[in-house]
């Protein structure tokens, strides 16, 4: 069955991924939205902002957020900053340490096949993920994430 893809604004999608990275399941997030129990959201790490925008979105567009959590979602548009944040939040990859900054691209990003598929699903616009043909010392293939040409 083909799942309907809900398009979330980048900040909402990133905070949703952050909540998952901090241990919340989609089911738990659905319950938080349905009950408006915002206190059940996990504490955000230093420098990761607040839940305010996510809560506003959840309060104003609960049907869209609930559908996204139940059926899957992608970002309606992602910036390079959003891509970098996603790489760090979801896969623990830090710019300058795990991969290189290409300005408006991410270079030599080590990703497993599942991560490539998930990243490609989340940030379709305007990004292209290309295998470089090289491998990291860990044996993972390296990728370039850049604007589609």
Image: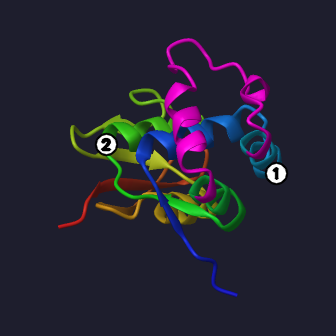
Task: Decide whether residue 44 is among the magenta residues.
Answer: yes
Q: Residue sitting at 55 percent across and 52 percent down? A: 111
Question: Which quarter of the figure is the N terminus placed in?
Answer: bottom right
Q: Residue sitting at 54 percent across and 20 percent down? A: 50
Q: Nearer the viewer, residue 91 or 67?
A: 67
* Whole-percent x, y for residue 32 in the image: 77, 39
* Whole-percent x, y for residue 91 in the image: 60, 41
Q: Nearer the viewer, residue 54 or 129?
A: 54
Residue sticking out furthest to the front: 60
* Whole-percent x, y for residue 139 in the image: 60, 52
Residue 91 seen in render: no
What range is drawn magenta here? Answer: 34-63
- Give the residue pinned by disc 2: 80
Mark 2, secondary structure of its residue? helix
Q: Is residue 128 above or below residue 50?
A: below
Q: Which mark is residue 27?
A: 1
Mark 1, secondary structure of its residue? helix
| 2 and 1 marks in contact (CB < 8 Å) | no
Q: Is residue 23 above or below residue 72?
A: above
Circle 1: is it few (<14), some (14-19), or many (20+) Cα within 10 Å? few
Residue sticking out furthest to the left: 149
Circle 2: is it few (<14), some (14-19), or many (20+) Cα within 10 Å? some
Q: Nearer the viewer, residue 15 or 144?
A: 15
Residue sticking out furthest to the bottom: 1
- In primary-sequence order, the first of circles 2 and 1 is 1
């Amino acid at each position: 069955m083909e799942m309907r893809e809900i398009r979330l604004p980048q900040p909402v999608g990133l905070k949703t991924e952050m909540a998952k990275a901090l241990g919340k399941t989609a089911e738990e997030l659905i319950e938080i939205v349905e009950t408006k129990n915002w206190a059940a959201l996990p504490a955000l790490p230093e420098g990761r902002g607040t839940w305010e925008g996510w809560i506003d979105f959840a309060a104003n567009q609960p049907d869209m957020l609930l559908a996204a959590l139940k059926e899957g979602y992608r970002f309606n548009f992602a910036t390079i900053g959003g891509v970098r944040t996603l790489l760090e939040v979801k896969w623990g990859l830090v710019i300058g340490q795990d991969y290189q900054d290409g300005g408006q691209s991410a270079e030599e990003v080590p990703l497993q096949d599942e991560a490539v598929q998930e990243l490609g699903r989340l940030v379709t616009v305007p990004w292209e993920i290309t295998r470089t043909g090289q491998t990291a010392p860990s044996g993972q293939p390296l990728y370039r994430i850049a604007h589609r040409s």
